[in-house]
């Protein structure tokens, strides 16, 4: 009986993983025409750069090439607010993400800036590395957009430290992983 339960558990796990992989595959958009993809990439990078330089120039990085992703709005993507998932369900969207050098600085998120586009290249969301964002960017007037300036917070990378707590006999009681702020 235990063997049957174990096999059933394994089968259910595999089905769940397969379903998750399939749903992510379904939500990733593939552009087969390489020329069209190159032109789209250029346009996305140009527009994203303009927006980041306008609202948070300190967040713009040329550390590496920006990461461009083509997706379909669904509940699978955790980086979209639920209001966007509901409003744009099933629509194609693109993101341009600016990576940064994690040896030199630290952000709360894995990028310095990220710009979200709808399929018609309308920018609907702009997110910055310290968690600040401009929501509903497409609904803002030109005057409102001109007033927005995201403040920059400089943070140096922390050093990862592992503390081992032992009892009187030298046996390990607990291992604590923490980050130590670098000296100023």
Image (spheres, rainbow, N blue to C red):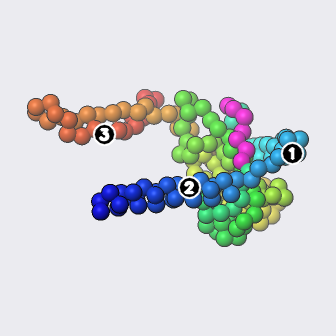
Name the residue tied to disc 3: 176
Q: Which mark is residue 33?
A: 1
> Which callout, 1 or 2, points at the residue further toward the start of the chain?
2
Name the residue tied to disc 2: 18
Q: Residue at x 15, y 30 (%)?
A: 170
Quick one: 119 or 159, which is closer to the camera? 119
Distance Cα–Cα, label 2 vs label 3: 35 Å
Asked if one can make out residue 55 in the rendered structure from this viewpoint, the answer is: no
Quadrant of residue 105 in the image?
top right
| Foreground label between 2 and 3 | 2
| Foreground label between 1 and 2 | 2
Residue 1's x, y, as percent?
A: 29, 62
Residue 75's x, y, as percent?
A: 61, 63
- Residue 64 sits inside the magenta stretch: yes
Highlighted magenta segment, given as a residue range: 63-69
- How packed mark 3 is, by other alpha carbons closer than 10 Å (few <14, some 14-19, many 20 or more), is few
Distance Cα–Cα, label 1 vs label 2: 28 Å
- How packed mark 1 is, by other alpha carbons closer than 10 Å (few <14, some 14-19, many 20 or more), is few
Q: Which mark is residue 91?
A: none
Q: Residue at x 72, y 65 (%)?
A: 90
SS at circle 2: helix
């Amino acid at each position: 009986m235990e063997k049957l339960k174990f096999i059933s558990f394994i089968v259910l796990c595999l089905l769940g993983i397969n379903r998750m992989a399939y749903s992510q595959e379904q939500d990733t958009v593939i552009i087969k025409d390489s020329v069209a993809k190159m032109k789209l990439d250029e346009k996305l990078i140009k527009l994203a750069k303009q927006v980041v330089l306008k609202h948070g120039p300190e967040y713009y990085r040329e550390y590496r090439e920006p990461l461009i992703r083509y997706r379909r709005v669904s509940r699978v993507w955790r980086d979209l607010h639920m209001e966007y998932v509901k409003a744009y369900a099933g629509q194609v969207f693109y993101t341009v993400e600016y990576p940064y050098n994690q040896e030199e600085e630290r952000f709360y998120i894995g990028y310095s800036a990220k710009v979200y586009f709808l399929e018609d290249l309308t920018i609907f969301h702009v997110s910055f590395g310290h968690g600040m964002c401009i929501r509903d960017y497409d609904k803002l007037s030109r005057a409102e957009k001109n007033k927005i300036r995201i403040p920059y917070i400089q943070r140096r990378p922390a050093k990862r430290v592992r503390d081992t707590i032992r009892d009187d006999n030298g046996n390990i009681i607990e291992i604590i992983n923490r980050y130590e702020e670098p000296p100023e």
